Amino acid sequence: MKKVFGAGAKMMFSQLYMENCLMAAVAILFGWVIIEITNPLVHKELGIIPVSNATFDLLLTGIILFILPLFTSLIPFIRYNYAAPITSLRSVNSNGGSIVSRKLFLLIQYIITFTLVICSLFFIKQLRFMLDTDPGIRIKDVIQTQFLKSESTNDGMSRAAWEEKRKKEQHIVDVLKQRLDASPLIEHWTYGDSPVKYKSRGFKFKLPGDEFKEFNIMFVSPAWMSLFEIEVTEGEAIDLKKESELSYELYISEAGKKLLGITDIRSAEMQPENRLWYNSGDDMSKNPPYRILGTIKDFNASHLAEKTNPMVLLSSGSWHEQPLLVSVVPGRRQEAIQFLKDLHDELIGGNFEYTFIEDQHKALYQKDLHITLVYTVFALIAILISSLGLFSLSLFDVQQRFREIAIRKVNGATTSVVMRMLLIKYYKLLGIAFLIASPIAWLAINRYLEDFAHKAPVSWWIFAVALLITAGISLATLIWQIRKAARTNPAEAIKAE
């Protein structure tokens, strides 16, 4: 119509461009308002700290406000500027290329949505798999705290002051032992390191005549093994009465026994590549082999994504400068914490700090929890955007077919028949998007898990649930719009045409 009344190309392009710029400006305004409102929530729940960068913000705003409208204006400008006015007028009520382009963009939206939803569901499953997997040792109701700390230096301290300090420390150690042994809240206690954070890698052992194999090593006492309920499957049982000291004896894990091909632990000795410990007063120039006391059940308290070497436990003493580990009677956590706090206030004073080994284990998966949460949020946003796109496409499509719907109803078509006719194309659209997105999501999941030592299986139900969630929300929006059109009075629709 504008061309009929003499509008030139510049005027038409200027109008299209200004209209798109105005819509972009409104979108930017709402976008920045949403960002500012949700900023505290994003920072608190997702752990994403926004970085203020005025140059980037202005550049991004300029691109959205001026460059994006340029591209969105070119397609309709080229289409209508170079077409004869009569051709453009004839295409006003046609549903040709505009519907096809909208379907294409909607298809891309749903491919992204299905991919994000599938990945989000799998990450939730993988996180639960890692958190629920039995580490092979006791981590529940075990408290780690610190009473006495080792001093790095005693420079400047007189002999008498040093003796007084050691006497005070020994008194604290004796009182601790007496109180902990007598408490009905405590099952076991010892000094030592947490198995969750303990890292000791790169040590190699071999059988006589074999090549060296890499192991992880922990120096622990029999009391430590008892507290964490290390299960001995073969050989000598844990002897709590045995003197805790460095020796040439060890327990090997079942995986380590298999790695070295040991058939009889009683006749096998393990030779370390280098000496493992040193003690003043003894001959430390030799590197003798170690006798195998027994085989222990495999355990892994580290992140399950990490590939770990087989474990060996070396008999060692415990020192009061190490963290205090206490296993609590189930159901009496708070009483035990208060007991230890009162004991700390009496003997040490100051702040009483403690952690549960179970919480340390969960903390290993904070990054995985964060990734899962971010994917879930983006999946929900993608579903919302796709639903809005489907709503706008169905609204445009239905309005273009008002006369067709009216004629079909005049000829006896029921509301359900009309709805089925209009829905079938969107069922196909969702199906195609799902078929494309499924292998993309499967590849993304496998790429993410390629370095994981332990991984949950990619179950079929993840894809089915993703389809049901996305299709259910989207089709609910679609059915509402189509049902409204199908119930329109045919006389009013034909009269409006």
Image (spheres, rainbow, N blue to C red):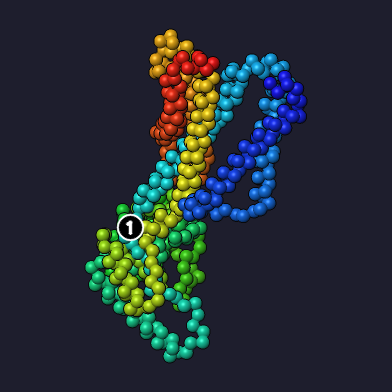
Question: Horizontally, is 100 left or right of 373 in the view?
Answer: right
Q: Which of 268/126 is in front?
A: 126
Q: Which of 42/446 is in front?
A: 42
Residue receiving disc 1: 140
Q: Give how far across and how far down residue 200 sits, in percent.
A: 47, 60
At 27% from the left edge and 76% from the top edge, which residue is drawn? 178
Q: Which of 299/349 is in front?
A: 349
* Image vertical order of residue 248 relative to residue 4, above or below: below
Secondary element at tag 1? loop
Quarter of the rendering occupied by the N terminus:
top right
At 47% from the left edge and 37% from the top edge, which residue is drawn? 117
Residue 289 sits in quarter: bottom left
Can the viewer see residue 445?
Answer: no
Q: Give how far across and how far down residue 24 sits, in percent.
A: 63, 39
Q: Which of 95/468 is in front?
A: 95
Residues packed near mark 1 inside 10 Å, few (<14), some (14 to 19) or many (20 plus): some
